[in-house]
Image: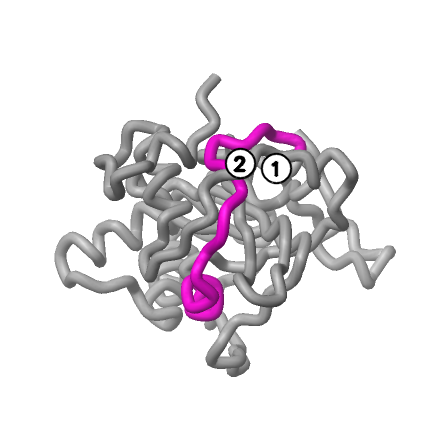
């Protein structure tokens, strides 16, 4: 497991964050979101999520932290900022979506065609953490590179989480049919590949990289 500084801008701060704690907490938040979806048919708000964390820490601070012997939690604060209504994207961007089983899955923008638009392929990355983009882009593809409707990216059905320059090997990744629809075919194909969904369109097998 790797550990890295919690605040990289403060070398004297010895607080650290680890890959495994990140993964565990991320999984916890996914499970909480599923409960809200199950009972309330929506995701939790940020206020609800932070409020849940605060309630747990208030009750269990002494059990789980080195500060608990001499301090009590009074409040947790969060700050947000508005983001553009339409997501920006570029060649080489690494993308994240949620598969049908709730786990993360990752794709990449391999080409920006001036007329057709972005071309996206999906990595064999189901369940991988988003903390190591280099590990993600080393995986092979399960969904070939083919066009995706701009709206799918602009509306964040795939979320841009970083960028890595494309290499010569990336440009040789297998290509799928030259087709575009209004649905998220890359994600539908990935769900089908992993046995998480049906064959949603007629030539879905042509879009897959079968081993």
Question: How many numbered marks does the figure carry?
Answer: 2
Expressed as whole percent of the image width and height from the top left, the position of residue 203 reads 32, 37
- Work out whether 152 lies above or below 29: below
CA–CA distance between discs 2 and 1?
A: 7 Å
Residue highlighted by disc 1: 136
- Work out whether 1 lies above or below 113: above
Expressed as whole percent of the image width and height from the top left, the position of residue 170 reads 69, 38
In the image, the segment drawn in magenta is: 138-156
Mark 2 residue element:
strand
Q: Please give the name of the residue rendered at 53% of the width and 80% of the height, measured from the top-left corner.
A: 84
Expressed as whole percent of the image width and height from the top left, the position of residue 28 reads 38, 45
- State which quadrant residue 145 falls in: top right
Q: Determine if the magenta segment contains residue 145.
A: yes
Q: Quadrant of the N terminus?
A: top right
The front one of 85 and 47 is 85
Residue highlighted by disc 2: 123
Q: Determine if the magenta segment contains residue 75.
A: no
The front one of 161 and 38 is 161
The front one of 165 and 181 is 181
Mark 1 residue element:
helix
Q: Are marks 2 and 1 in contact (CB under 8 Å)?
A: yes
Q: Please give the name of the residue rendered at 35% of the width and 29% of the height, measured from the top-left corner.
A: 194
Q: Earlier in the sequence, mark 2 or mark 1?
A: 2
- Work out whether 198 lies above or below 89: above
Whether residue 23 is visible, yes or no, is no
């Amino acid at each position: 497991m790797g550990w890295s500084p919690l605040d990289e801008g403060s070398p004297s701060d010895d607080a650290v964050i680890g890959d495994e704690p990140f993964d565990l907490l991320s999984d916890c938040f996914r499970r909480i979101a599923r409960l809200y979806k199950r009972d309330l048919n929506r995701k939790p708000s940020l206020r609800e999520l932070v409020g849940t964390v605060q309630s747990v820490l208030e009750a269990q601070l002494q059990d789980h932290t080195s500060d608990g012997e001499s301090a009590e939690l009074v409040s947790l604060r969060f700050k947000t900022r508005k983001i553009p209504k339409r997501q920006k994207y570029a060649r080489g961007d690494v993308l994240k979506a949620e598969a049908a089983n709730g786990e993360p899955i990752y794709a990449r923008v391999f080409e920006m065609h001036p007329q057709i638009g972005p071309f996206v392929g999906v990595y064999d990355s189901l369940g991988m953490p988003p903390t190591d983009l280099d590990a993600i882009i080393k995986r092979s593809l399960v969904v070939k590179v083919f066009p995706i409707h701009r709206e799918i990216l602009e509306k964040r059905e795939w979320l841009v989480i970083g960028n890595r320059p494309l290499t010569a090997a990336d440009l040789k990744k297998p290509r799928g049919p030259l087709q575009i629809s209004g649905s998220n075919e890359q994600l539908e194909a990935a769900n089908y590949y992993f046995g998480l969904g049906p064959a949603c369109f007629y030539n879905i097998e042509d879009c897959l990289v079968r081993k």
